[in-house]
Every structure is written in C-alpha cells, then in structure tokens.
Amino acid sequence: MDVLATSVLGAVEYGGPWEVPPIGELFNFRPLPGLEALGVDRVVLMLLLSTLMICAFFYAATARSRIVPGRLQAAAEGIVVFVRDQIALDIIGPKGRRYAPLLTCFFLFILVNNLFKLTPGIMFPPTGHIAIPALLAVIAWLVYLGAGIAEHGFLGYLKQTCVPDAPKGLLVILVPIEFLSNILLRPFTLAVRLFANMVAGHMLVVITLITIHAFLTFGPGLPVGLFALAVSPLVFGFELFIIVLQAYIFTLLAAVYIGASVSHEH
C-alpha cells in the first residue's frame, strides 16, 4: 500500500508521469529489521496477532463461565454454536460434531485476518497473501481426504469420489474428470476464491483512501474528493460484508467437502 500511495500521491500532488508499481508490492513485505534470518515480516506479525486475539477472546469468555452467560461468554458460545449447528451438523450430519472445532478455527481465523483489511493502522488482510489461503486450503484438503479414507478405505474412497454412476463406456472420460475436480482442484479453488476476493477488496480500499487524500483539497479535484468521501461508507460497508461472507463460504465449503468424503451416498 505504501508504494502505491507514494506513486499516486506524487503524481497527483506534484505532477509528472508515474508508473503503476507491480501488484506484488501491495502484498509482499520485507522482513523486519533484526528478524531477516527468521523471515518475520508484517504478515507474520499479523498472523501471530490474530491467533493471540482469538485465544485471548475465548480465554476471557470462558475463564469464569456461568450458567447465565455474560455478553462475552454469550458471544463466544454463539460463534461456536453457529458453526457447529448451522455448518458442521447441517452439512456433514451427526459426524460433523467431531469436525466442528476445526471449522470454528477456520471461520474465526479467516474472519479476524480479513478484518485487518479495515483495521486502522494495519489496513492489510493477511489472507490477501496467497500463502495463507493456500495453507488453509491444504489443511482442509488433508482433513477431508483423511476423513474419506478413514470412512471408506483408500480404494473405497477413490471409488466413492471418482467413479460416478454412468455407462461403463463413459467412465474412461468421467473418472479422470472426477479425480481432477474432486481430488486435485478443490484446494486450489478454496484458496483462490478467498485470495482473489481479499486482493480485490484491498485494492478497492486503497484506491478509495488515496483518492480522498489526494483530491479532498480546494481546487479542480475537489468534486472527485467529495464523491470518494461520500461513497467511502458504502465501500467499507460492502467490504465488511465480503469479509464475513468469505470466512463463511470457506468454512461452509470445507464442511461440504468433508461431508461428501464421509457420506455413503453415491
């Protein structure tokens, strides 16, 4: 964000040509001074911060649990019950209870890291860095593969997942397609969906803030600045909706894939 902001503001305020920086400069950060050997940068710090925030939230909510919950305990219980009942049990069935903790972790971890996109002083979602959605997708992939193999056995799971009910002559074509779509492409689509939405949203927020800063001064650009300021609540409201929606969709699809793996219906 800093590089893009410097380029755009320099062009607007001081005139002259400027080049759009590579998109990677919006999402890749140099390691922090003194931590180069460990590769610790802003993204790593935000991941640690989000983990600590989630742990602190549940510790504070459950440290003094009561039969009649207070607001914090009720909020924590509401999140857990929502993921368990509305996602795990509804999608997977009775076996979904064992996967509810993982799905809750997915939902909260993605939600908090997505919210960093609108957090003053941070304004960057770690989920906009492809490595993070990819890691989460690989975890989901390993879980639903392991669940399916544990439920059906290795060959039974492959038959359940990759061999559709179709005439035998078509299986030569359909089996590789099913294997590709159900085994190999699912983690890819999980990761790319979350990553692409966070990248697009981050760029929209950056452009909105830069436009307000650059044009909200008396002069020819004032109408542009006023327009950007007027629509900014809509932009941030829309991004907040996308932030929650993407956390929900990732968790929901992970549950769908696990449910399909452990199901005995073909």
Image: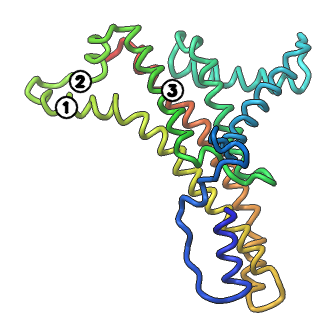
Q: Are marks 1 and 3 in contact (CB under 8 Å)?
A: no
Coordinates of residue 11 in the picture (x, y in percent): 66, 83
Locate residue 61: give its quadrant.
top right
Q: Are marks 2 and 1 in contact (CB under 8 Å)?
A: yes
Q: Tell me the mark number nearer the camera, choosing from 1 and 3.
A: 3
Q: Which residue is mark 2?
A: 164
Q: Tell me which amino acid carries mark 2.
A: Pro
> Residue pushed farthest bottom?
220
**Of label 2 and label 1, which has the lower sequence position?**
2
Q: Is residue 173 left or right of residue 186?
A: left
Which residue appears at 88% of the width and 15% of the height?
63
Coordinates of residue 124 in the picture (x, y in percent): 68, 52
Q: Which residue is mark 1?
A: 174
Is 150 rendered above or below residue 252?
Answer: above
Which residue appears at 84% of the width and 23% of the height?
74
- Crowd around label 1: few <14 · some 14–19 · many ≥20 (10 Å): some
Q: Which residue is mark 3?
A: 139
Q: Is residue 144 left or right of residue 41?
A: left
Q: Tell me which amino acid carries mark 1.
A: Leu
Q: For this rendering, which residue is in front, 66 or 190?
A: 190
**Of label 3 and label 2, which has the lower sequence position?**
3
Q: Tell me the mark number nearer the camera, choosing from 3 and 2.
A: 3
- Crowd around label 3: few <14 · some 14–19 · many ≥20 (10 Å): some
Coordinates of residue 68 in the picture (x, y in percent): 91, 14
Q: Is residue 247 left or right of residue 191?
A: right
User: SS for tag 1?
Assistant: helix
> Residue pushed farthest left?
169
